[in-house]
Amino acid sequence: MTQQIQQPPAQEPVVPVTSDVPAVAALARAVEELIAQGLDEQALTAAVRAELEAALAAGFELPAEQVRPDPERYVMYPLHVAADGGFSIASAVWDVGQGTPVHGHETWGVVGIYSGVEVETRFEKPARPGVPLVLEGTDEWGAGQVTVCCTTDDDVHQVRCGGDQPVVGIHVYGADIGTLPRRSYDPATGGVHWFTSRWAG
């Protein structure tokens, strides 16, 4: 039987966002300048990782409404969305016991932990639909730690809160992640469906 490949839905319109938190605004300017250099994904994500590590090490405070967990599901708050949709910075919050499905991003991404503990389980990106996923490993990330979570060739993981307090991550993506259609996977069967995270209000 031929595996049906579900086509992604159209991307929603981009609505620019600019943070009034100085550290976030400075990070956004740095990322914009790095993207303008035309670096390949490996060099770009390494440079963004260094910028995010420095921002977290210097310390900054996000408003309470941008780190508030939702009792029903994990949430992503827009901290910065470029006018052209070329990149975004999010505050992603998981309450205790919450996690994501296994998913991809369809773009590059760098994640730094603002507070709490994140548990990340990584899978090999499947070469075709309908193939069970291969587990690569699991890591725990604590406050101040930064990782390249995805590139075009390495783009499938699952994330959950790993502690007794909510985990808040600062996520930098090479697209407007709140409007970008992305793949979710059934790891046992390799089945795929498309979803959009959508920004929290």
Image: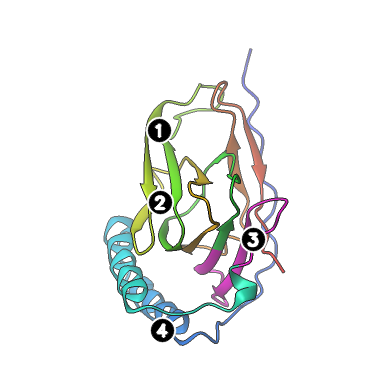
Residue 192 in view of the camera: yes
What SS does tag 4 mark? Answer: helix
Rate crowding at label 3 as few (under 14), some (14 to 19) or many (20 or more) other CA atoms within 10 Å: many
Residue tagged by mark 4? 26
User: How far separated are the C-alphas under marks 3 and 1?
Assistant: 30 Å
What SS does tag 2 mark? Answer: strand
Q: Of the two numbered discs 3 and 4 on the same chain, state the one appearing first in sequence.
A: 4
Question: Of tags 3 and 1, which is closer to the observer?
Answer: 3
Residue tagged by mark 2? 149
Label 3–label 1 contact, CB within 8 A:
no
Label 2–label 3 contact, CB within 8 A:
no
Identify the amino acid type marked 4.
Ala
Label 1–label 2 contact, CB within 8 A:
no
Residue tagged by mark 3? 69
**Residue 56 in the image: x percent, y percent?**
36, 72
Q: Residue at x 47, y 83 (%)?
A: 25
Compared with residue 121, is residue 58 higher up or lower down, i.e. above or below?
Answer: below
Q: Of the two numbered discs 3 and 1 on the same chain, state the one appearing first in sequence.
A: 3
Rate crowding at label 1 as few (under 14), some (14 to 19) or many (20 or more) other CA atoms within 10 Å: some
Q: Which residues are magenta?
A: 68-91
User: How far separated are the C-alphas under marks 2 and 3?
Assistant: 21 Å
Question: Of tags 3 and 4, which is closer to the observer?
Answer: 3
Give left or right: position of 32 versus 198.
left
Rate crowding at label 2 as few (under 14), some (14 to 19) or many (20 or more) other CA atoms within 10 Å: many
Residue tagged by mark 1? 124
Give left or right: position of 40 versus 128.
left
Q: Residue at x 48, y 49 (%)?
A: 163
**Residue 83 in the image: x percent, y percent?**
57, 77
